[in-house]
Amino acid sequence: MLRAPGGCRPERTGVVTRRKLPVAALAGAWGSVALLALSSPRAVAQQSPQTRPDPSGILTFEAAGASGSLSGWKGHPSGPEGTLFLDSTVVHQGRYAGRIERRAGSPSSFSSFALEIPVDFAGKELELRGWLKLEDVTGFAGLWQRQDGPTSAVQFNNMQERNLHGTSDWSEYRVTLPLDPGAHSITVGALLVGEGRVWVDDLRLFLDGKPLADAPVVVRAPTVFETDHEFDAGSKIAIGSATPVQVENLVLLGKVWGFLKYHHPSVVAGQRQWDYDLFRVLPRVLNARSRSAARTVLADWVGSLGAAPPCGSCAELPAGRPVVPRLAWLNDRALLGADLSARLVELYARRRPQSKHYFVSMEPAGNPAFSEQPYAGMHDPDAGYRLLALYRYWNIIEYWYPDRDVTEEDWDGVLREFVPRLLGAATGDEYATAMMALIARVHDTHANLWSSLALRPPRGHAEVPVVVRFLDAGAVVTGYSHARLGPASGLRVGDVIRAIDGVPVDSLIARWRPLYAASNEAARLRDMARSLTRGEPGPVRLAVERDSTTLDLDAERVLIDSLDARAGNTDDHPGPAFRRLSDDVAYLKLSSVTSAETPDYLRRASGARCLVIDIRNYPSEFMVFALGQHLVRDTTPFAKFTMADLSNPGSFDWGPTVSLEPEAPWFEGGVAILVDETSQSQSEYTAMAFRARPGAVVVGSTTAGADGNVSAIPLPGGLYTMISGIGVFYPDQRPTQRIGIVPDVSVRPTIAAIRARRDEVLEAAIRRVLGREMTAAEYEALRTEATPEH
C-alpha cells in the first residue's frame, strides 16, 4: 500500500491510498503498515445455497437510524470521538445519512466509516458506489475500499487522487478494484482527512456490474496458514546460547531457509506455513554435532519438499542489470556439501517466471510489499521466533532491498554476528533492541524499528523544552518547544550543549550511534538532536558553551506531552505557504502547501526574478508534477528507478525514466531550492524534480538520503520496520540513497545568524540567483506575514 504521498512519518497515523498514477507520481510516498498479500488462488469447493446477510440497510444508514445509533459501522482509527454522526436532517434519500465532522483538534488526522464484509463470493471486479456532500473540507474526502488477505491488505483505494475538497452538493462517486484472489474480507466506507464536514449516503456494492446481494455464496478451501496451528503458542525452541558449530549451522540454515522461501515452487505458491517449517527443522540443525551433519539434515529437508519439476520455459537473468543476486554460494561445496549444493543449484535452474508470490508482491509504484505474519500476541518471543525475525529480515534485505549494494556491510557477517545476539536476548526489550541494532546496519533512514522507538537511547518521557540541532559548532540550541518553559530552562538560543549530567555529548553520540538507523550522518545527528535531552522528568545538569565560556546549568526535563511536537521538525519559516517578499523574490514553503492552490501561487509569483522553494521540511501535499510542470518549457527527465523482479529475487532492473511535462503558465524567473537534513523521502524526490529545471540551484546542506516508496516489514512480537523500496537515481544513473541531494551551494547556519534570526541559507539563495544581498524589507515581509509561534 501507499500512503498519501509523503515521507517517513511512522510515528503518526496516516491515510493509505492506492493511487492510479504513473510510477513517477508515487516515488517518495510513504508505504503503509498495511501490507500487500497475495495468497494462492482461492479454491472454491462448492456453491452454497445459503444467502449472505444483506448489508444494504447499514450501507444506506437506514438500519443505523432505526436502531438510533451507528450500529454496524466501525470508525477508523477507533472511531475518533466526536467525529462520526447519524444525520436525519441532511440526507440524499431515505431518512438517514452518515456525517463525518472534523474540527481543529479532532483526534487523529482523519476519520472514516468502515464496514467489514467477508468475501464469500467470486468474481473479477468489485465496485463501491455512494453519494457524498462536502462542506469546507480542507484535506480530502472520498469513498474507500480495502480488500484484506490472511495477514494484510491486498487492494486499497481511497479516492485521494480525486482530491475532493472544499464545498460541493450531493454527487455519486465510485471506487472500483479488481477482486483479489487472496482477499478474505473487504472493508468499505467513507473518510475525511483534515477538517470540514462530509455527508455519505446510499452506499452500494456491485460485483462485475451486478448487485453483490445477487452473487452466489461460495465456500473457500482453507489455506495451510489457517489449518497449521502447531506453533501458535511458541516455537518449542529453548536455547540461550550456541556453540561456534551451532552458530555456523544456524547461519547456513538462515540462508537456505531464505533461498527456499523465495525459490521453491511450493513455498512461493503459499502451500507451506514456512515459518512453522523453520521450527520443525531447527531442532535437527541444533542437534547436529558438526557442520557436515547439519548439511546432511538440510539436504534431507530440501529433498522432503519435493524437487522442482523441469520447466519448458525457465526464468532467466537478463544481462546488464545494475544489481544481481548474490548466489555464488549455491556452488560452494565446501560450504554446503555436494548433495545440498546440487539440490539448490537444480532448484534455482528450474525456477519459473513469476507474476505472483505468496510472500512478496509488487506495488503499482514498483516497491515490494511483504505478506508476513506479525505474531503480535507474542510479547516476549522465544528463541525460535527470535531467529525467525532475524532470518526474515536478513533475507528480505538480501533479496528485496534495492539499495543492498550500498549498505557497505558484509551481510553474511552481519547474519553470523546476530545469531548469538538474538539467541541471547532474554526479554522482549532485549529482543527489540537487538533487532534495532540489526536494522541500523542497513543504513537506511526509513529503516528504523518504528514500533519500538521508546527503547532507543536516551530513554524517558521528558525533555528539556528546547530545540537542538547539530551544526558545525556542535549541539546548538536553536529554539524552544514551549514558549514559557523553554526560556525558563536557562538555555539561550545559540548555546552549545557540551555535556549532560557530566557525560560529554560526543561520548553519548558514540554510545547511541549503533541503535540509530540512518542513511548518512546528517540524518543520524538530526534524529539524535531531537532526543538529546530526553530522560525522566526532573532536574538535569547541562554543561553549556556560551560566547566561548562554559557554564553549568541546572535545567528541568518536562513531560514530552506538554511540549510542541512540531518544534524543530522543519527549518522553514512560520506563516503562510506563499509570500511575496519583494518585487524580486517570491517564497514558497512546501510544509503547508496545497496543490489545488498552485495556480494562485504562480499568479502571485508572476514577475518575480527569483522563486525560492523551501523544502527544509516535508511537503504537505505531493507537488512534484503540480508545480514542477510549470517550471519547465520542454519534457525534462529528472529521475530513474530500479525495481525488483519476482522471477529473479535479488535482482533489480532499471525502470522507465521519469520526466516533467511542461504546462502553462510558466514561471520565468530563477529558481532556488532550499534543503537540509530535514529533507527526506518525498522532499528529496521533489528537490530532484525541481532541480531539473534549467538553471535551478539547490542551496543548503546534504539531505537525509532515503528516497523511494517505503515497504513495511512486520516482525514477530508485533514489531515492524520499513525499507526504502525503490532505488532512486538521477537520469544519468547517479545514485541518491545514502548520498541524498547534494546542494550546489553548501551553507550551514552559524550561531551568530541563529541568534540574529537570520536565514543564511535563504540569503545565499538570493545572493546566487540575484547577485545581491537579501534586504531588510524582504526579511520584514517574511516575518510580518508569519503566524505567531506557540
Image (cartoon, helix red, strand yellow):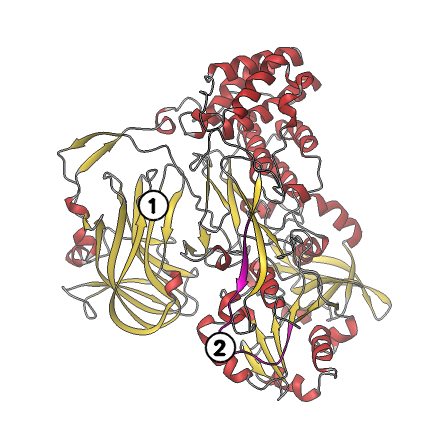
Instruction: Report the residue that reaches farthest toward the right.
Output: 548
Relative side of 42 to 292, left or right: left
Kind of residue at disc 1: Gln
Look at 73% across and 71% down and name the residue there: 493
Give the mark, 2 or 1, whose residue is nearer the N terminus: 1
Residue beneath disc 1: 147
Kind of residue at disc 2: Ala
**Does residue 782 show up magenta in the picture?**
no
Q: Quadrant of the C terminus?
A: bottom right
Point out residue 439 in the picture as x, y percentages from the top left corner: 62, 41
Look at 76% across and 53% down and name the residue there: 501
Element type at mark 2: loop
Residue beneath disc 2: 664
Point out residue 541 in the picture as x, y percentages from the top left corner: 75, 58
Q: Is residue 8 above or below residue 224?
A: below
| Label 2 crowd bin: few (<14), some (14–19), many (20+), radius 10 Å | few
Q: Which residues are magenta?
A: 655-672
Distance from disc 2 to disc 1, alpha carbons, whole Å, reads 40 Å
Look at 65% across and 25% down and name the residue there: 329
